[in-house]
Image: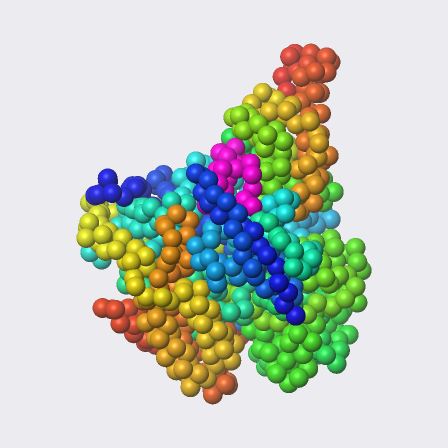
Amino acid sequence: MPETKYETHQYDVIVIGAGGAGLRAAIESSALGARTALICKSLLGKAHTVMAEGGIAAALGNVYPEDNWKVHFRDTMRGGKMLNNWRMAQLHAQESPARVLELEEWGALFDRTKDGRILQRDFGGHRYARLAHVGDRTGLEMIRTLQQHAVHKGIDVFMECTINRLLMDGDRVSGAFGYRRESGKFIVFQAKAAVLATGGIGKAYQITSNSWEYTGDGHSLALWAGADLIDMEFVQFHPTGMVWPPSVRGILVTEGVRGDGGTLRNSTGERFMFRYIPPMFKAETAETEDEADRWYTDKKNARRTPDLLPRDEVARAINTEVKAGRGSPHAGVFLDIASRRDSEYIKRRLPSMYHQFKELADVDITKDPMEVGPTCHYVMGGVRVDADTAASTVKGLFAAGEVAGGMHGSNRLGGNSLSDLLVFGRRAGQGAADYARSSTGSTAASLSQIEQCSREALEPFERSGSENPYTIQQELQECMHNLVGIIRTEPELKQALDKIRTLRERSAHVKIEGHRQYNPGWHLALDLKSLLTVSECVARAALERKESRGGHTRDDYPGPDAKFAKVNVVLRERNGALSVTQEPLPEMPDELKSLFEEKK
Amino acid sequence: MGSQFRFRVWRGDSTGGEFKDYPVEVDEGMVVLDVIHRIQATQANDMAVRWNCKAGKCGSCSAEVNGKPRLMCMTRMNLFEPDSTITVAPMRTFGVIRDLVTDVSFNFAMAKQVPAFRPKPREADGTYRMQQEDIDRVQEFHKCIECFLCQNVCHVIRDHQEHKQHFAGPRMFVRYAALEMHPLDTNDRTELLRNKMGLGLCNITKCCTEVCPEHIHITDNAIIPLKERVVDRYYDPLTRLAHKLFGRK
């Protein structure tokens, strides 16, 4: 290895990404005795997990003893329109209570019930109040708890370090190549196994709740290494993002507002969600405002409010209302909790929403309704993994959290992400540590591979072109927003693919000024590669799925299609070419199938 | 509806630098961070700045705006007169890496030295029972987003860098308080706080409390109660005697 030229480190397991999944994976891997490095693009504790608000879904049964993993499993599968990997959904529902209790043992302090146990809150698509939470800042509590636990366990953390490529030894992962933001110097990790925990792709869209980091790095690293991606057509638009003023457009407004009694209204004051109850959820959704309002306190005799239908349903409904001219002044709809709950309750339950609207929009949510609209929030698709071990289809490569696909099917329920991070973060850490222990022989990456990575990374400084990386990113975001957004059609998807091709060509002419030390223009120029890759994946998969389901709505194929109910759209790259195929979903065992039959 | 501003942004690195002027148009509702991003996208692609959530939740974009330490993402431009000059400088207490990005590794090094949470055993039914009113005060401390603005304004290190060797700073005192007052914790950090973490150096001027974007009452609710614990333990004659005779409490 070229020790003199590159900063080089050797580990058993490297974990790329330090949000909830990455931290949990590193903790597990390290606890199992694997030498583990945790690598993150930002400072430790700043990953997107910190933005999660509402809570962690886990069938603890503290508020409703009737709740159990089977009910949670059923809710999750139905929320995902049955496209979920059933085994992942099962493990998730079974293990999330233990993962929440574990956080408590590591110092997390959740809000309490009257008898001193963990309080649980209502959320969209969950039959019972199920989300363990801390006001509306649950993600902060979770990431801080995991971060401090990891630090106390002495795990090596590489902060502000971006990975550009996975290194391969034949068909096995043998490490990763990246750079340190602070110095701009390259860094090489040699490792037996790598866990991807890089989060999502939100930065490919114009209106997004995601920060600069979410450029689809892990999705792209996996694809380039030969791994399969599934379900990339399914992108979740969270129904409630801020819409005004323009500079805050997209910032998340927690579903907890509706969980705690808030309701959606259009410009006529109508609670329009009653008109958008799909057949699948008709039996368990309230038909009148009176029934919906009673449900908050009486789950036995009233059915749930349609305000809390799964996110895909609510986002589409808002989109339709706005298009029909019944939107709010700034092209959203109203989210009203002011007229429904008292000021003190709102401030206690939703302190950061109160703060956020007051500071950024001059709106007092205890007095006036909020204006909200859909914002790109989450990608259901990702690296195809084995449910039990989180292993991808490439040897030595694991994935957990948002970057992994399958768990949420075509649409994720709110609250199921934080629990996903914990359950599969732990399993990925375990899978990687076990793999590293059993893998024989040493792995290495050839010098020529590393030199190639280095050349690619430095190209933007050496070109004679004049493209600005920010301009290309902005055009890509507009393209994805307008043509591959909530509602899609074949001509628009094809147009998007053309545009992506052009932008890819232009990105080869991006020229970076200045030097390598903490140069955001350079960082973005490198991120463009993965942004363009995942954008193409989303558009290609969206073109393939000729039906509407969950987070994928085709205006030209408005309904679900039984043929597509049985397949994943799979993307893989071979010799630089992207292929798209349909492959059968794993078959659910009969005893689980029966959970979907007996209900009304 | 756009209005013109002149931004004076500090550009440079650990070897030195200077303020550079950028004329920029500002739209309704923008915050300082938006303006910095606009300058970055159009006039200075390589301007270094940290940010993530843009909603006051991650604590990445701390800087000194017109001399006042704040989160850039929560500083609305309508605070300022149009046509005025806005100065944006990196936090002063930490060394500059580049432009607005500072070396905050001191805080992470101090975090490593905090003795871990050590919980008591679970109840017989496998749960931990805690009443909401018993955790309210600790939940206040858990609101900390680690923007390090409190560390930045604390005179003990801002004016005396040499104290960084033996002074944890307000952020870490909040963390110590969160652990010490956690209903389940059994660890004891009093000796460490007194001896190694420089709790006594704080002369409660409350600068930290003033800049906290989460409005945590750092001085009143965290630092002063910690100081009282130290006093009770080490300077109250009866407690000292009891401590000597019977060990902790």
Q: Check residue B93 for magenta coloring.
A: yes
What residue lies at 74% left-to-right and 68% top-to-bottom?
A: A369
Q: Is residue A306 left or right of residue B89?
A: right
Q: Check residue A390 for magenta coloring.
A: no
User: Which quarter of the figure is the N terminus of chain A placed in?
Assistant: top left
Is residue A297 visible in the rendered image? The answer is: no
Is residue A313 visible in the rendered image? The answer is: yes
| Residue A395 percent coordinates (x, y) | 27, 56
In front of the other: A330 or A292 = A330
| Residue A260 percent coordinates (x, y) | 70, 62
Q: Using the image, determine if residue A532 lies above or below residue B33.
A: below
In front of the other: A346 or B184 = A346
Residue at the bottom extreme? A556
User: Which quarter of the figure is the C terminus of chain A placed in?
Assistant: bottom right
Q: Quadrant of residue A245?
A: bottom right
In front of the other: A247 or B5 = B5
What residue lies at 45% left-to-right and 75% top-to-bottom?
A: A479
Q: Quadrant of residue B212?
A: top right
What residue lies at 73% left-to-right and 72% top-to-bottom?
A: A292
Task: Write the start and end of the magenta stretch as one range.
Answer: B89-112
Q: Is residue B53 left or right of residue A577?
A: right
| Residue B21 percent coordinates (x, y) | 54, 53
| Residue A342 percent coordinates (x, y) | 80, 60
Q: Is residue A532 left or right of residue A239?
A: left
Q: Is residue B169 left or right of residue A578?
A: right
